Image: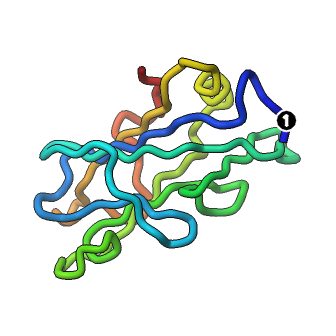
């Protein structure tokens, strides 16, 4: 692996805004294990992950990897589980939301790899139109990833 712009990884945060009350959310590891929130309040739950940069893909895009990164190299994403899938066995909900990483720009990633640059954050809605926890492929609430301190 070649060192790119000062590092080979960056920090990423997925924040679930307005999660459904009394429902547990957890980030899913690639091996199926679960991770607890980094920060949680009634209005939001945040999960942090380290994203590694693998060998450059043949199309010139970066190959994103890490313990929370799932999918093929051309379609990487992170799962946010809720209810039973998050370990809350007495929940009536059994859901998983897919947060795509494809909208991460190479410029943003290169900036985030610089020492002291902060982390990349994406925010998603914690609920689906039916009032339950978010599920399926979800969009970022402000349509983009941001670099935050």
Which image quarter holds the C terminus? top left
Q: Specify whether 105 is left or right of 20.
A: right
Front residue of 93/113: it is: 113
Residue under the point 66% across and 44% down: 52
Residue 111 occupies quadrant: top right
Crowding near pointer 1: few (<14 within 10 Å), some, many (20+)?
few
Q: Position of residue 116 (x, y in %)?
A: 54, 18
Residue under the point 35% across and 64% down: 135
What secondary structure is marked by label 1?
loop
Q: Specify whether 116 is left or right of 74.
A: left
Residue under the point 28% across and 48% down: 125
Front residue of 9/102: it is: 9
Q: Position of residue 56 (x, y in %)?
A: 83, 42
Counting every numbered tag in the picture gives 1
Q: Position of residue 81 (x, y in %)?
A: 36, 65
Residue 102 occupies quadrant: top right
Q: Indicate whether 121 appears above or below 38.
A: above
Q: Specify whether 127 is left or right of 11.
A: left
Q: Position of residue 86 (x, y in %)?
A: 32, 69
Residue under the point 45% across and 63% down: 28
Q: Which residue, given by chain and number where applicable, does mark 1 sit on?
A: 2
Q: Indicate whether 27 appears above or below 32.
A: above
């Amino acid at each position: 692996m070649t060192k790119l712009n000062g590092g080979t990884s960056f920090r990423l945060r997925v924040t679930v805004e307005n999660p459904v009350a009394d429902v547990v959310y957890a980030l899913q590891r690639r091996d199926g294990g679960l991770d607890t929130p980094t920060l949680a309040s009634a209005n939001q739950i945040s999960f942090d992950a380290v994203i590694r940069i693998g060998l450059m893909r043949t199309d010139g895009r970066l190959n994103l990897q890490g313990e929370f990164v799932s999918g093929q190299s051309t379609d990487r994403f992170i799962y946010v589980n809720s209810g039973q899938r998050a370990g809350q066995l007495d929940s009536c909900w059994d859901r998983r939301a897919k947060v795509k990483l494809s909208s991460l720009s190479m410029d943003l990633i290169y900036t985030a790899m610089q020492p002291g640059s902060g982390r990349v954050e994406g925010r998603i809605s914690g609920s689906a139109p039916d009032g339950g926890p978010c599920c399926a492929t979800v969009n970022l609430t402000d349509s983009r990833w941001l670099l935050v301190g």
